[in-house]
């Protein structure tokens, strides 16, 4: 490491996918959207496919086509599709497309005609999240149109899917409510002549905690990367044998740029929101909000340096943060770890999420800056 790096352990990705796959009889889709949640879409996709995933999930058409251009031939589902996209390129590349509206379905039929082959579609029903998908009131019309398009040879209805509101809170009443709506939607589809091969609704949380929601395909995202979507309190209530055995794959770290002794009462960083209590050593770490460090981590973000976890002193800057190290023997060139596996008591993405009032998803996806290189370890690591 020269200055800073994000280290991604592909063996941890393999371990996590294998554990998830062992816990279900359903097929497994590894969700690699958002550049693999900041871990790198292509290396993660290959590692996931090597270890038991049979599908890949992305949001955008461009993400799906990037996988295809990289030579990945596994089934890929893209589900966040605005009007006017060149969907025929996705159809020609064998990309499955998610649709929750008649407008989207019409565009997929047109794309199939342009591509000269049926579009593989997954019909989405909104079971309560109120984002994408047809509402229960609009669902029959969408299914009827899809059945007609399938009879015409324009589409193949591969799947029916939905997404949970609150599966990360085990026992929440919305989980059963949504499953009821989903099963009613499946019954309606069957009555109208649509019998998909794949029924899927389980995200990471449901993959981990609701086997009755696995159906034909599960779609873990954050769990692939070794993080749990459950809150700490929910996880702590599990017995050791019930915990999930996931391994965080990402470590973010940097070398200290310089250290200096300053007197008591010295204001630190912009706005002097932090003042030293006594004469102390400050260490400057060259990572800031341009690199993924949340500015909300000012005076709260945990960083391990010299065997101790310290809090950022004062405001996070665009390019750097400062640590108050007291009289500890820290020096320029020492390695400061923002988050990692937590195996030896160091901070984790969950610690950062707790410090800034967010979720671990946001922490890891922030660290995709071109200024901080990704370094891969494990089998199949890119050179």
Image: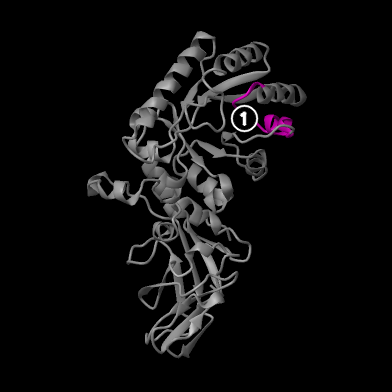
Residue 38: x percent and y percent? 54, 54
**Quarter-wise, where is residue 116 in the image?**
top right
Q: Residue at x 35, y 75 (%)?
A: 308
Residue 358: x percent and y percent? 45, 53
Q: Which residue is mark 1?
A: 97
In the rendered view, tell whether residue 219 sits above or below residue 191.
below
Circle 1: element type: strand
Q: Nearer the viewer, residue 234 or 62?
A: 234
In the rendered view, tell whether residue 167 sits above or below residue 352.
above
* Quadrant of the rendering where the C terminus is positioned: bottom right
Left or right: 291 in relation to 339: right
Mark 1: give few (<14), some (14-19) or many (20+) Cα within 10 Å: many
Q: Residue at x 45, y 67 (%)?
A: 338
Q: Nearer the viewer, residue 116 or 236?
A: 236
- Whether the magenta-drawn stretch holds residue 50 is answered as no
Residue 25 in view of the camera: no
Residue 33: x percent and y percent? 56, 44
Left or right: 38 in relation to 27: right
- Magenta range is 85-102
In the rendered view, tell whether residue 342 sits above or below residue 204.
below
Left or right: 257 in relation to 70: left
Q: Residue at x 73, y 30 (%)?
A: 88
Residue 70 in view of the camera: yes
Question: How many numbered dots are placed on residues in this image?
Answer: 1
């Amino acid at each position: 490491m020269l200055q800073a790096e994000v280290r991604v352990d592909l063996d941890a990705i393999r371990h996590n996918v294998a554990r998830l796959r062992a816990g279900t009889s359903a097929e497994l889709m590894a969700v690699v959207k958002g550049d693999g949640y900041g871990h790198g879409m292509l290396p993660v996709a290959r590692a996931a496919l090597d270890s038991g995933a049979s599908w890949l999930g992305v949001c955008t058409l461009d993400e799906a086509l990037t996988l295809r251009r990289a030579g990945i031939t596994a089934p890929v589902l893209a589900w966040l599709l605005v009007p006017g996209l060149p969907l025929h390129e996705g159809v020609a590349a064998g990309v499955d497309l998610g649709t929750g509206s008649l407008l989207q379905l019409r565009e997929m039929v047109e794309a199939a005609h342009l591509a000269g082959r049926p579009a593989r579609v997954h019909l989405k029903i909104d079971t309560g999240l109120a984002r994408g998908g047809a509402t229960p009131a609009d669902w029959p019309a969408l299914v009827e149109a899809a059945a007609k398009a399938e009879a015409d040879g324009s589409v193949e209805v591969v799947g029916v899917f939905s997404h949970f509101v609150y599966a990360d809170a085990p026992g929440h009443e919305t989980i059963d409510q949504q499953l009821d709506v989903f099963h009613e939607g499946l019954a309606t589809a069957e009555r109208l002549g649509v019998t998909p091969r794949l029924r899927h609704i389980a995200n990471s949380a449901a993959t981990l905690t609701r086997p009755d929601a696995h159906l034909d395909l599960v779609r873990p995202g954050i769990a692939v990367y070794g993080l749990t979507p459950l809150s700490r309190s929910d996880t702590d209530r599990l017995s050791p044998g019930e915990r999930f055995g996931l391994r965080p794959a990402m470590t973010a770290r940097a070398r200290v740029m310089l250290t200096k002794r300053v007197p008591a009462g010295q204001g630190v960083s912009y706005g002097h929101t932090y003042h030293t209590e006594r004469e102390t050593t400050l260490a400057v770490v060259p990572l800031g909000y341009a690199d993924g460090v949340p500015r909300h981590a000012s005076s709260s973000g945990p960083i391990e340096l010299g065997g101790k976890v310290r809090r950022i002193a004062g405001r996070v800057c665009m390019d750097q943060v400062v640590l108050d190290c007291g009289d500890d023997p820290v020096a320029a060139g020492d390695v400061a770890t923002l988050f990692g596996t937590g195996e030896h008591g160091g901070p984790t993405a969950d610690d950062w999420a707790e410090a800034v009032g967010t979720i671990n998803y946001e922490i890891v996806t922030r660290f995709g800056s071109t200024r901080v290189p990704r370094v891969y370890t494990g089998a199949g690591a890119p050179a």
